């Protein structure tokens, strides 16, 4: 990794450069800056772009060719050719990896400038479990594939400067020294852009002067609930609940505190009291079971429903996050459109338990409700009507425990706890694995139903594992198999193996 230099290298040859960026990362801005840089440096330049159609709607490939101005007009190509790139700039780690696979990065020629942060691909997000690719393997490959590489987290640098990644990538380009232009010309280009200049310059300088050895290591996480503000009676109640966490096994306290925060935020203090009673019960069987109970009981109690979705979408913190992500000043007007597609199941779940169950038990009523509700809706929440509608739904939070969905979720939780209690008497490790199976259930609508289906298959294998000394290991293996793919082939194969060995 080279330091920034005012490169006066031979400038008599054609220079080819490609930028790979996805929507919203400022790839077009970066390409214009590079073109302006070449023009200021006395080069003729041509730039083109090809929109991508791959993952996340695809990276756009911006392509530039430049050569010193002469009396003869230069003839430039319109698109990059594998093996013919002098410089490739990738806005994300996997985009750099794909460029290597496509032959755009070669060890005899190409300087690679890439940010090592990740934007997860659809294929990574769609798996039930952790589908993230192994970043370290990709980093090794891109370094070995390039003639010279400048790779570090440029997204973090841009974010800290309050700018877009295009500015820090521009700094990475200057840092590489691969173009025959003085650093001052890069800065002149940014100043001439006339918008967000100070933040862009800060991001540019951050990448230009990046020192991997000087990057501060993250501090250990602080307590998630060090300070609580609100009405005195609620604060007193919270403090009483929080004090009980100190009596739990030490290794489970951090998870229990995070779980308590989640549960109380989801519902109320009495819900937190119920949560702590469950955790305290399992904590008698050791640290491992206490930690599993603290995490997965909280997840089971905080299911996603219409009330939760409406609550999260109407919080002021979300509005601040949206503005921050889009770098929108406080005074600017923003239009926010939410997309909803509620089915009859979600509507019934948000009705009083008796009424919701009655509708579900009468197919004609249920079918009519589904025809009315089961369609996509776009709701503008930057206005009074749309926001007020969601706020009214979120206000049903106080009555949530009277609704049909809570009845179903409570029955599921009690069945899960009963299985774990029975196992804890003889095999605390198996009890912890039973609780961890809650990880299979997440989201709402079809995703939630598929999770319950996988959960039922895994838990159903307990009868075949009963009495076996390796029961906890096998249940853990089944759970991992259920998380391995969306179609369930790995789980079916593991279940067949369990049955053949029982």
Image (spheres, grey):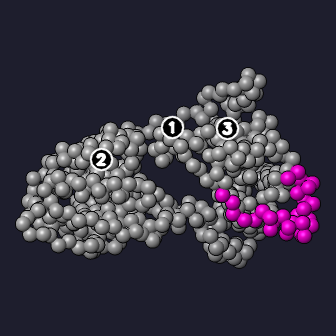
Dot 3, how many residues are within 10 Å of its Cα: few (below 14), some (14-19), or many (20+)? some
The residue depicted at 11 percent of the width and 62 percent of the height is: 69
CA–CA distance in space, label 3 to label 1: 29 Å
* 226 horizontally vs 243: left or right: left
Mark 3–mark 1 CB contact (< 8 Å): no
Residue 223 magenta-drawn? no
The residue depicted at 8 percent of the width and 59 percent of the height is: 10
Say whether disc 2 or disc 1 marks the residue closer to the N-terminus.
2
Judging from the image, what secondary structure is the residue with disc 3 in? helix
Front residue of 91 and 197: 197
Q: Main secondary structure of the magenta part?
A: helix
- Residue 315 figure quarter: top right
Front residue of 183 and 415: 183
Label disc, if present, on residue 371 of the rendered structure: none
Q: Which residue is mark 3?
A: 261
Which residue range is magenta in the image? 351-378
CA–CA distance in space, label 2 to label 3: 46 Å
Judging from the image, what secondary structure is the residue with disc 2 in? helix
Residue 157 image point, x, y percent = 37, 44
- Between disc 3 and disc 1, the foreground one is 1
* Picture quarter with the C terminus: bottom right
Q: Which residue is mark 2?
A: 193
Residue 117 image point, x, y percent = 41, 53
Q: In this view of the protein, can residue 355 be seen by the observer? A: yes
Residue 373 image point, x, y percent = 78, 62
Mark 2–mark 1 CB contact (< 8 Å): no
Label disc, if present, on residue 330 of the rendered structure: 1
The residue depicted at 23 percent of the width and 44 percent of the height is: 187
* 72 horizontally vs 326: left or right: left
Say whether disc 3 or disc 1 marks the residue closer to the N-terminus.
3
Dot 2, how many residues are within 10 Å of its Cα: few (below 14), some (14-19), or many (20+)? some
- Between disc 2 and disc 3, the foreground one is 2
């Amino acid at each position: 990794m080279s330091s920034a230099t005012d490169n006066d290298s031979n400038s008599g040859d054609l220079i080819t450069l490609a930028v790979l960026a996805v929507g919203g990362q400022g790839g077009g801005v970066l390409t214009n800056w590079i073109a302006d840089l070449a023009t200021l440096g006395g080069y003729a330049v041509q730039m083109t772009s090809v929109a991508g159609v791959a993952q996340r709607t695809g990276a756009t490939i911006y392509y530039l060719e430049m050569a010193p101005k002469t009396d003869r007009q230069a003839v430039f190509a319109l698109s990059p050719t594998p093996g013919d790139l002098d410089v490739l700039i990738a806005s994300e780690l996997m985009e750099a990896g794909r460029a290597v696979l496509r032959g755009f990065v070669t060890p005899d020629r190409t300087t690679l400038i890439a940010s090592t942060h990740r934007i997860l691909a659809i294929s990574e997000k769609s798996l039930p479990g952790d589908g993230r690719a192994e970043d370290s393997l990709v980093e090794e490959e891109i370094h070995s594939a390039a003639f010279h590489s400048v790779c570090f987290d440029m997204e973090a640098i841009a974010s800290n400067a309050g700018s877009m990644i295009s500015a820090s990538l521009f700094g990475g380009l200057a840092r590489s020294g691969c173009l025959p232009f003085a650093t001052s010309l890069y800065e002149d280009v940014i100043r001439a852009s006339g918008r967000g200049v100070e933040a862009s310059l800060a991001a540019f300088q951050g990448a230009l002067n990046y020192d991997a050895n000087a990057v501060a290591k993250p501090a250990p996480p602080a307590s998630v609930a060090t300070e609580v503000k609100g009405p005195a009676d609620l604060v007193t109640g919270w403090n009483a609940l929080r004090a009980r966490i100190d009596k739990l096994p030490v290794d489970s306290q951090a998870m229990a505190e995070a779980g308590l925060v989640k549960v109380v935020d989801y519902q109320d203090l009495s819900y937190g009291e119920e949560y702590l009673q469950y955790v305290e019960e399992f904590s008698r069987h050791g640290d491992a079971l206490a930690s599993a109970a603290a995490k997965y009981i909280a997840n089971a109690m905080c299911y996603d429903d219409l009330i939760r979705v409406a609550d999260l979408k109407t919080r002021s913190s979300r509005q601040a996050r949206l503005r921050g992500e889009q770098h929108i000043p406080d005074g600017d007007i923003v239009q926010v459109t939410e997309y909803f597609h509620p089915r009859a199941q979600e509507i019934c779940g948000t009705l009083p338990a008796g009424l919701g169950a009655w509708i579900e038990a009468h197919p004609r009523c249920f079918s009519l409700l589904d025809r009315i509700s089961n369609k996509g809706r776009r709701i503008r929440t930057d206005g009074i009507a749309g926001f007020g509608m969601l706020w009214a739904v979120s206000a049903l939070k106080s009555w949530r425990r009277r609704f049909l969905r809570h009845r179903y979720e409570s029955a599921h939780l009690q069945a899960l706890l009963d299985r774990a209690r029975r196992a804890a008497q003889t095999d605390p490790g198996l009890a912890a694995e039973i609780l961890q199976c809650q990880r299979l259930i997440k989201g709402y609508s079809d995703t939630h139903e598929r999770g319950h289906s996988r959960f039922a298959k895994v838990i159903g294998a307990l009868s075949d594992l009963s009495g076996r000394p390796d029961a906890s290991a096998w249940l853990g293996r089944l759970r991992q198999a259920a998380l391995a793919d969306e179609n369930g082939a790995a789980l079916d194969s593991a279940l067949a193996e369990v049955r053949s060995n029982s």
